Image: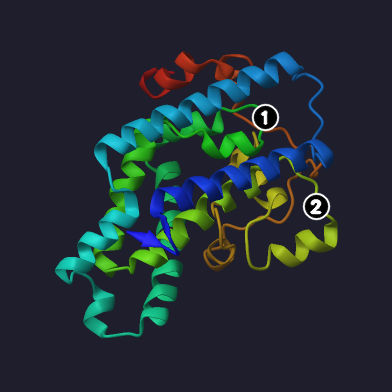
């Protein structure tokens, strides 16, 4: 399906490339955390590993879900499945409801991946990254990406979400995840204003803290309302925004930078 003359993959890839390039540049100009222990060589190794995981996840997803989430929405729409079509809502209203509902579904999924031990084994690949930056948003084990798409597809079919709303949600979710993982220093006033509505880098970085109580907070990737609503919101890390330590202590800082180590991590006993 074409949107304003371009296909759905073109929109998603173009938005991803633009957001990634902009945030990577901003990280260099206004970094929140300076990591002297991460030399250029180690940073390059992290980036190669994280981007390689993204490529592997994308290939697996392409095989399992050739039409992606938007294709699922088009299929559901063709058969008249879902709650929203049954209610006969205007397309704009149905689209807005679907967008918000999908954002809550992703927040809930994130919480579940932390609370269910077998799912945490998979999700810890993301948290093992010792340095949080724009590439950390891409560091999700292929199995987690596949399970996430299954969950997302189920929600899309249940809702009967409009295809355009799903496409917009996918673009915003990807850009939002890269934004709030970015090693970016925002002006304090801007951060305080933005986090009333969306998840900011300083807010989400707390979720990557080595402190367990802080890891179990700030689960949102896009809208910040869910953490406030369910009392999982923490405003500032105990060590302060400039001294927070991220990653998982048990794995150290060098091992998680290796691709093969990261891919087999969910299957390790430790």
Please say if the residues under marks 1 and 2 sit with CB atoms less than 8 Å apart: no
Across and down, in percent, residue 65 comes to 27, 43
- Left or right of 121 on screen, residue 213: right
Position of the N terminus, as image quadrant, is bottom left
Give me the disc on residue 186: 2
Give x and y (percent) for residue 57. 39, 32
Disc 1 from disc 2: Cα separation:
18 Å
Considering every residue shown, the one lying at the far left of the view is 79
Provide the residue designation for mark 1: 131
Q: Quadrant of residue 242?
A: top right
Residue at the image position 54 percent from the left and 51 percent from the top: 219
**Can the viewer see residue 248?**
yes
Name the residue rendered at 53%, 57% in the picture: 172
Q: Is residue 67 left or right of residue 181?
A: left
Q: Is residue 213 visible in this depiction of the protein?
A: no
Q: Please tell me whether residue 81 is drawn above or below residue 207 in the rendered image.
A: below
Percent x, y of residue 14: 53, 47
Q: Residues within 10 Å of mark 1 (few under 14, many from 20)?
A: many
Mark 1 and mark 2 lie on one chain; the one further toward the N terminus is: 1
- Seen in the picture, residue 190 relative to 129 is either above or below; the reply is below
**Element at badge 1?**
loop
From the viewer's side, name the closer residue of 176 and 226.
Answer: 176
Secondary structure beneath dot 2 equals loop
- Quarter-of-image position of residue 166: bottom left
Q: Residue furthest front?
A: 5
Question: Label 2: how many residues lie within 10 Å, few (<14), some (14-19) or many (20+)?
Answer: some
Foreground pick, 64 / 241:
64
Residue at point 69%, 62% (across, down)? 195
């Amino acid at each position: 399906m074409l949107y304003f003359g371009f296909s759905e993959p073109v929109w998603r890839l173009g938005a991803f490339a633009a957001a990634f390039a902009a945030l990577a540049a901003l990280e260099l100009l206004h970094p929140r955390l300076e990591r002297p222990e991460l030399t250029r060589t180690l940073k390059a190794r992290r980036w190669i590993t994280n981007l390689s995981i993204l490529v592997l996840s994308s290939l697996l997803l392409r095989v399992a879900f050739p039409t992606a989430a938007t294709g699922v929405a088009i299929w559901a729409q063709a058969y008249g499945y879902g709650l929203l079509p049954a209610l006969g809502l205007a397309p704009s209203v149905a689209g807005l409801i679907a967008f918000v509902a999908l954002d809550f579904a992703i927040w809930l999924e994130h919480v579940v991946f932390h609370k269910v031990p077998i799912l945490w084994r998979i999700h810890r690949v993301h948290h093992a990254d010792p340095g949080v930056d724009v590439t950390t948003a891409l560091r999700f084990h292929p199995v987690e990406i596949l399970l996430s798409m299954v969950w997302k597809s189920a929600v899309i079919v249940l809702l009967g979400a409009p295809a355009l709303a799903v496409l917009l949600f996918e673009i915003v979710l990807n850009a939002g995840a890269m934004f709030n993982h970015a090693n970016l220093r925002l002006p304090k006033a801007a951060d305080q204003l933005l986090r009333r509505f969306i998840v900011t880098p300083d807010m989400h970085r707390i979720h990557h803290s080595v402190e367990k109580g802080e890891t179990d907070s700030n689960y949102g990737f896009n809208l910040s309302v869910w953490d406030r609503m369910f009392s999982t919101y923490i405003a500032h890390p105990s060590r302060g925004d400039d001294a927070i330590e991220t990653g998982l202590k048990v794995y150290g800082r060098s091992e998680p930078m290796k691709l093969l180590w990261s891919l087999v991590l969910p299957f390790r006993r430790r």
